[in-house]
Amino acid sequence: MKYCYLEDFRLTYSQMDPNMHLNLFSAASISQDLITKLFALVECDNIQIALRRHAVWVIAKTRMHINHMPPCSSTVHTTSVFTHISPYRVEMESRFTNDKDELLMVVRQLLCPISMETRKPITIYEVDFPENAEPDEKLLEDPYLRMRHDFSAEEPVFRRTVRSSDIDFSRHFNNCMAIKYVYDTRPVAYWDTHRLTDFEVLYIAETLENEKLSVYAAELEDGTEYLLRTEEHDCIRAWCRTEEKENRKWNW
């Protein structure tokens, strides 16, 4: 059986960037909410499996392709489906379209269930993922990247301490906050003249409250690669590609 979750969103002022288009953090937050809603459809979202199985889903990878960030007060139509199912992981894809049925962006996310006691992976069937679920065809075919840049000679762009407001239901650093940190490596003036086209995040290890994160960035031929690390280990790698905006004015 193929499962599909549909929802429409009216975008608000608080979700906008300085140029009055949906900001990356809000796009990631909507995408993360769609995870919960799609998994709730099959009765194994984080709230249910935490109570029933003492387990949670964690995001291992996120890949995003953006054709156009929608403007303020517009309506975005989302469709979320499962695109890959294996014993230890599930991949899902959320598609964002406008009123003209134009594809705005696609977000692909790879998730794994872990035990809340051991923090170790468990099978998807141990959290009651339906055995009759079938994967749908994916729109975003690009493979996940192998991000291996050596940052040992680099100086961090900035350092921040993980605070309580950065922690989510899984009791670790919220995935959306990681995306926000990456976005913050660029000044507003850069985003006035450039737009994001592709974005990927690899979550390597959990980051906990009060840990000190250093954020690194390196310009490469095919984009910019990022590393978030604590004093002891690498936590998150990310990559993005941008292009110059054709129209630098507000486009309502």
Image (tube, rainbow, N blue to C red):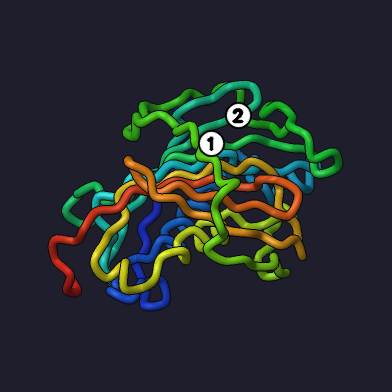
> Secondary structure under badge 2?
strand
Q: Residue furthest left?
A: 246
- The residue depicted at 35 percent of the width and 31 percent of the height is 142
Q: Foreground: 176 or 149?
A: 149
Q: Are there few (<14), some (14-19), or many (20+) residues within 10 Å of tag 1?
A: many
Residue 4 shows up from this direction: no
Q: Quadrant of the C terminus?
A: bottom left
Give the left or right position of residue 73, taking residue 235 as reference. Answer: left
Q: Is residue 143 above or below residue 204?
A: above
Q: Position of residue 12 (x, y in %)?
A: 37, 74
Which quadrant of the structure image shows residue 136?
top left
Q: Foreground: 212 or 27?
A: 212
Give the left or right position of residue 198, taking residue 251 as reference. Answer: right
Give the left or right position of residue 168, taking residue 225 as reference. Answer: right
Q: Is residue 179 above or below residue 137?
A: below
Q: Is residue 121 above or below residue 167?
A: above
- The residue depicted at 73 percent of the width and 32 percent of the height is 121
Q: Which residue is mark 2?
A: 89
Q: Which residue is mark 1?
A: 110
- Residue type of the residue flagged with mark 2: Arg
The CA span between labels 1 and 2 is: 7 Å
Q: Foreground: 75 or 72?
A: 72
